[in-house]
Image (cartoon, rainbow, N blue to C red):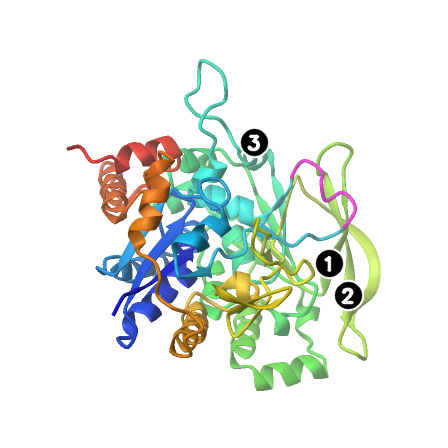
Amino acid sequence: MKPLVVAIVGAGPSGIYAAEALTAQSEIPVQVAVIDKLPVPFGLVRYGVAPDHPSIRSIRNTLERTLERDDVSFFGNVAIGRDITVEELRSVTDAVIYAYGAASDRRLDVEGEDLAGSIAAPDLVAWYCGNPDVHPETSGGDDHRYGHNPIEELITRARQAVVVGAGNVALDVLRVLIKEADELDETDMADEVLSVLAQKSITDVHLLARRGPAYTAFTTKELREIAKIENVDLLLDPADFDLDQAGKARITKDKVAARNVAAMQDWLDRPITGAPRRIHLHFWTRPVRILGSDRVEAVEVERTRLNDTGRVVAAGPLEPITAQLVVRSVGYRGIALDGIPYDQDLGRVPHADGHVIREDGFSPDEYVTGWIKRGPTGVIGTNKSDAVETVHSLLNDVSDEALMARHDIAELTSLLADRGIRPLDLPAWQRIDAAEMARGQGHGRDRTTIVHHSELLAAATDPD
């Protein structure tokens, strides 16, 4: 029986879990091409999980086992729209699964949001995780081999920072901003990232949550890590923990919320030591304006409450928080790619059970999984069940003969080769992997991330 050739756009967890679901079944033979615009696989596991969380980042070892299968091929450094169009990809494969995630961010929509010093958490996270897309190749001058991301200047000049958000990404950002650089030395952060963090002078990080402590989206483990940072005082308002009836009802029903509130209540008893750095947690607080003439100088905030319908409304006077850096961490958002249906309001690809819907109905060979399918919700493991649902829809279409095997994976390889495009395969990634480990061992740690495209491509080159 001829294998069904399935292209998966995106080599993050959602894409690789889809490859796993396809190859785990035996009724329908498949040949899977996992395509990514970056030279390396693993998406947000590599470029979205904080480097001081090695246990979560190690998920990539499990994901790599799927890429090692004989019926799975990795096509790295191949961008949809740049190297091959969606229509061309569909013309040389039997089905396409879009798994390219949510690369943009949600905005605050407040005055002053575009001032210098106001940035999106995804951009900061990509920088400190070493994403080559945010580490310039050259500054254009004779003295520097590589350019500089504007984030680097912001971090080194700021003394007070405001992080807006009440999820794990906000906590990741808070930790990286407040920790001393030597507390991050054992991570796989790039040397140039650690060098910038060693120059930062941030003494205060304020986290703003527009709802109360019973409504956070933190995982308890992440939250408790905040209390373990050395030489830092934790500042909270005890009044925020006088829970109203809605808050009490929430912690009764939600065990994670109950654990989070209990953990933070314990912090209320911690003495203020006069430590050189401080974390300020502001609940029932939202930004209404970012102040400054040409760059961030402060954030104007207001107290909030829930009205009778459960909506957040204003509840107090406006007050400024001095800051030179503002990081919005209020959610990721999917982006539109040429040739792929997109719901602008939802920031997702329209679908039913993972089967893509175009204007004239179900597309015969297009599917979607991950954040670009359901929105930026859930944890890494959520992508596994999501991928299974999508693959189930695809396999049902094959069983119903709505989808049939007509192509060979060599057609995709030939199309790219005719354009002079040489995708990076799994052995190329493994050479990069070995180079990063060697670089890390030279610095007394397990790995050091390579952050520039040119260096990644050089490391990927087969010495033979």
Q: Secondary structure at mark 2?
A: strand
Q: Which residue is mark 1?
A: 286
Q: Is residue 111 magenta?
A: yes
Write down the quadrant of residue 190 in the picture: top left
| Residue occupying the point 69% across, 61% down | 345
| Residue occupying the point 41% across, 71% down | 391
Label 1 neighbour load within 10 Å: few <14, some 14-19, many 20+? many
Could one spot residue 252 in this view of the protein?
yes
Q: Which residue is mark 3?
A: 153
Mark 3 vs 1, N-terminal side: 3
Which residues are drawn in magenta? 110-117
Give the amino acid at mark 3. Glu
Mark 2 vs 3, N-terminal side: 3
Residue 126 in the image, given as x and y percentages of width and height: 48, 45
Marks 1 & 2, CB-CB < 8 Å contact: yes
Residue 17 in the image, given as x and y percentages of width and height: 37, 65
Image quadrant containing the N terminus? bottom left
Could one spot residue 52 in this view of the protein?
no
Marks 2 and 3 sit apart, C-alpha to C-alpha, by 33 Å
Label 3 neighbour load within 10 Å: few <14, some 14-19, many 20+? some
Give the amino acid at mark 2. Thr
Marks 1 and 2 sit apart, C-alpha to C-alpha, by 7 Å
Mark 1 vs 2, N-terminal side: 1
Q: Which residue is mark 2?
A: 304
Query: On screen, 28 above or below 99?
Result: below
The rendered magenta stretch, by its main secondary structure, is classed as loop
Image quadrant containing the C terminus? top left
| Residue occupying the point 46% across, 53% down | 48
Decide which of 104, 152 is in the foreground and name it: 104
Q: Is residue 333 left or right of residue 421?
A: right
